Amino acid sequence: MKKIMFAGMVLALGTVNVFADCTTDSLASASDLVGKSVDASGGGENWKESHCGSGTSGQLWKVGAGTVVDPAVQIGTWSVSGDEVTYDYGSAATTYTWTLRQSGSTYFFCKGSSLVASGTLGSSVCSAP
């Protein structure tokens, strides 16, 4: 019984810390994403996308494994304004705007005070092999 309670306490504490990052003053500049790939997960999804272009907008590419079976391909566009990043996957129903926050090397994509996904940045993959 004590093991179950301890595991529950650890899970509850972990959840509080993750969600706290969407309500603290750790706002990040969405321009941090320019020329970078993001490897983030949340809500049962895993994002592996590259922010190609310069300035405040550009093409959004699925990273893929760089093979014929899983190539890097353009999947939409992205744009930034301050601490917000907008992803457009081709229709109004698939346009999302998130507030970007940061703690160390981890970035948090937030909708209000709710965490949508979190992950790290890496090298960009902006063309098909």
Image (tube, rainbow, N blue to C red):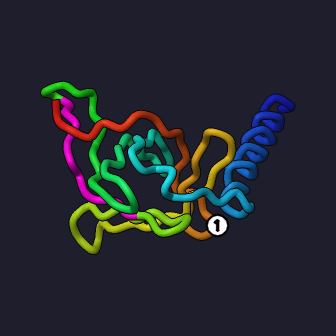
Label 1's element? loop
The quarter of the image holding the N terminus is top right
Who's the residue at 73% across and 62% down the image? 25
Q: Is residue 40 magenta?
A: no
Q: Residue furthest left?
A: 68
Dot 1 alpha-carbon crowd within 10 angstroms: few under 14, some 14 to 19, many 20 or more: few
* Residue 96 image offset from top left, x and y in percent: 39, 66
The image quarter containing residue 22 is bottom right
Report x, y in % for residue 85.
45, 63
Most foreground residue, 21 or 129: 129
Kindly identify the residue that appears in the image at 26 percent across and 61 percent down. Answer: 89
The number of callouts visible is 1
Q: In this picture, which residue range is highlighted in magenta? A: 70-79
Left or right of 110 in this view: 125: left
- Rendering coords of residue 90 (x, y %): 21, 65
**Above or below — where is 16 with respect to 79?**
above
In the image, what residue occupies the spot 61% across and 42% down? Answer: 106
Q: Residue at x 37, y 40 (%)?
A: 48
Which residue does the numbered mark 1 point to in the structure image? 113
Q: Is residue 68 left or right of residue 75?
A: left
User: Is 122 placed left or right of 104 in the picture?
Assistant: left
Residue at the front extreme of this rendering: 55
Three-letter amino acid code at disc 1? Ser
The residue nearer to you, when weighing 116 against 74, is 74
Check the image and report above or below for 108 versus 9: below
Magenta portion: prevailing SS class: strand
Task: Give residue 72's position: percent from left, percent from top.
Answer: 22, 37
Foreground of the two, 17 or 51 = 51
Quadrant where the C terminus is found in the figure:
top left
